[in-house]
Each structure stands twice: as C-alpha cells, then as structure tokens.
Image: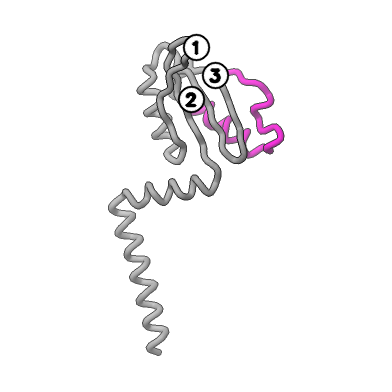
Amino acid sequence: MPREDSAKGGANGGTSGTMVDTILATCRAIDAGSRLRSLTMLGGATTLRLRPGAATSAETFVASLGQAFPLAQTRLHRNVLDGSMEAHVCVPEAHDAEDRARQLAKRNPLLRVLLLSAYLMALLAFLLAICT
C-alpha cells in the first residue's frame, strides 16, 4: 500500500508515523488489495481513509479494523466523488484513547468485578490502617 513520505510522522514526530505504519500493515494483512485514500494528522489524532480491495467487502474490512484497533473509531464511509465505500479509521489522542479504554473496560463484566474488587480492597486497607 504505497503512501507518501510525509505520512511517516513529518512535523508530528516518529510516533504517529509508526502508528500509521502499523495500521497500514494490518490493512495489508486483512486485505492485500487495500489502499490508503487519505491521511490526516491533526493535533494528536490521526484519521485514515482506506479502500478495501476487490476480495473483501467494505463491511468486513471495517469490522476487521475495529477488532484490530479497539481504541480507534472505525466506520464505513461513502466517498461522495465516486460512490465507493471506504473505511474511516480515527486514532484518537492519548487522553481520548484512555477514556475509550475505560469505557470498553466498564462494558466487560469480568473487568467490572475486578474493578469493584480493587475498590473494596483499597477500602479494606484504609479501614485497617485507621483501626491499627
């Protein structure tokens, strides 16, 4: 999936470029015929528009990207210029990614139980410290 050298981080440093390289490599693994249509780096967020190859449906492509990058926002997007369907992947800034990770963790029943257990242990430790 060819892309311009400016996508390797440019003024934003190497971290964004590494992340973009990881996303592009994952796209190639999902669908070797996929192509990068656009790349936008604004602040700490990175947005990519990717077109799947002929072998993969756009819906399957977006779902696979969503599973591979759970902290990114993925959705299907129709290109108004040619009517084709593209994957829209937005990798958020660090603080937004942390918020999304917390939201995902709260949806998982096992993680909610672990979080509640951690709070109870902290409360118990606090009470024991006061009593002694």
Helix, strand or loop under label 3: strand
Residues in magenta, as a range: 1-26
Of the residues under marks 3 and 2, which one precedes in the sequence? 2
Q: Position of residue 63 (x, y in %)?
A: 37, 28
- x then y, percent, for residue 65: 43, 30
Task: Name the spot of residue 44 as percent of width and height, x first.
Answer: 60, 40
Real-space Cα distance between discs 1 and 3? 12 Å
Three-letter amino acid code of the residue under disc 3: Arg
Give the number of the disc on residue 106.
none
Q: Is residue 56 above or below residue 42?
A: above
Give whichever of discs 1 and 3 has the lower sequence position. Answer: 3
Q: Is residue 121 above or below residue 56?
A: below
Which residue is labeled 1 in the image? 81
For the view shown, which residue lies furthest in the right direction? 11
Q: How is the image coloured?
A: one colour
Number of other residues with Cα within 10 Å of mark 1, as a class: few under 14, some 14 to 19, many 20 or more: few
Residue 13, position as x, y percentages in the image: 68, 38
Q: CB under 8 Å between callouts 3 and 2? A: no
State the quadrant of the N terminus.
Answer: top right
Q: Mark 2 belongs to which amino acid? A: Cys
Please report contact status of discs 1 and 3: CB closer than 8 Å, yes or no. no
Q: Which mark is residue 27?
A: 2
Type of amino acid under label 1 = Leu
Q: How many marks?
A: 3
To which quarter of the image does residue 84 belong? Answer: top left
Dot 3 corresponds to which residue? Answer: 37
- Mark 1 or 2: the one toward you: 1
Magenta-colored segment: predominant secondary structure: helix
